[in-house]
Amino acid sequence: MNENNISDCQISCQAWAQFMRVSGNLLQKVEADLKAADLLPLAWFDVLSEVRRAQPKWLRPIDIQEKMLVKQYNMSRLIERLANEDLVERKSCDCDKRGMYIVLTAKGNAALDDIWPVYKAAIDQHFGDKLSPNEISSLMKILGKL
Amino acid sequence: MNENNISDCQISCQAWAQFMRVSGNLLQKVEADLKAADLLPLAWFDVLSEVRRAQPKWLRPIDIQEKMLVKQYNMSRLIERLANEDLVERKSCDCDKRGMYIVLTAKGNAALDDIWPVYKAAIDQHFGDKLSPNEISSLMKILGKL
DNA sequence: GATATTTCGATGCAATTGCATGAAAACCAA
DNA sequence: TTGGTTTTCATGCAATTGCATCGAAATATC
């Protein structure tokens, strides 16, 4: 048997392949739903969401990066785009003059409120509704090990 | 309670968030391992891998797209890059003059053989070794529903 | 407290992706 | 047939990502 092929590999490689395929597919579907509703890209929303969730604490770009597992330069540019659209504001912080705080604007808050119901519905439709409570908790447990 | 935030949402949204975070993180780690070994990007490898797996059948771009859940224009360009590096060859097919067959070159075969051990080790390290056989089969079952 | 090292964020450039659209062949329906 | 529709693949252009590197501020070391 030729082992140089993922399909001829042991079960863990098959599981890996399916894991990647399913997660990519789900992400595309949810993104497509947001786009169909003329909303922001998911990454933009995630930043806004992290900023709101942290309230009343203010976050710095590096904090958001770490939560979202996004590269530094991508976060820098994502924030630039959000700021260009008046969705967030960059506030300089006296404690560390290299850095800054990222704060939601009124427009950013409104955008979050617009997106959330659509996002939630998409998650339910493509993910939550397809799994039983037991399966979800089992999945969470497995994900926790990874 | 404010429902306009993923952290205040029911369990399925938390599971969604963790699912996306974990899958993205794993993908990054495996890609980083390939890169550290000076190998091809994962997407390139996946195409070669699909082509080899289908042997002796020949695949067309559209077949690979569907297997990989990649957009048509991305597959078109990915194949162009692979062909530019002599990893695959595009063979015109008489049965359908719009299309073509994608065939591995000797160099493409060799590249696959180079990548595979590194890829397999990365999958084991970041994924397979962290889960028990039971967990893997449970995960597979859950992924099958999504 | 002077110097070296690390951390935080930005940016030029190349590679990739997304989107709209085009061209050619296949298919279909009257 | 002939004309309209669909399928398959390519491509121009804009947006995004990856990579290397920079500048400035903070921190550690001596």
Image: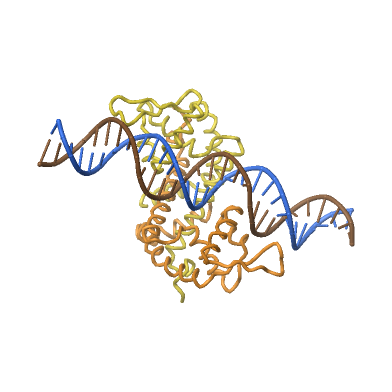
Chain colours: A orange, B yellow, C brown, D blue
Looking at the image, the residue that sits furthest to the top is: B106
How many numbered badges does the structure rendering display?
A: 0
Q: Camera-side residue: D8 or B14?
A: D8
Q: Is residue B18 left or right of residue A92?
A: left
Residue at 51% x, 39% y: name it: B42
The location of residue A5, given as percent across then percent down, is 46, 32
Q: Is residue A68 left or right of residue B78?
A: right
The location of residue B14, given as percent across then percent down, is 47, 63
Q: Camera-side residue: D7 or B69?
A: D7
Q: Quadrant of residue A138?
A: bottom left
Residue at 51% x, 44% y: name it: B128
On screen, residue B60 above or below B22:
above
The location of residue A21, given as percent across then percent down, is 42, 46
Quadrant occupied by the N terminus of chain A = top left
Q: Camera-side residue: D29 or B129?
A: D29
The location of residue A116, given as percent across then percent down, is 43, 66
On screen, residue C14 above or below A119:
above
Looking at the image, the residue that sits furthest to the bottom is: B1
Residue at 61% x, 61% y: name it: A61
Q: Camera-side residue: A18 or B91?
A: B91
Q: In this view, does A77 lie to the left or right of D28?
A: left
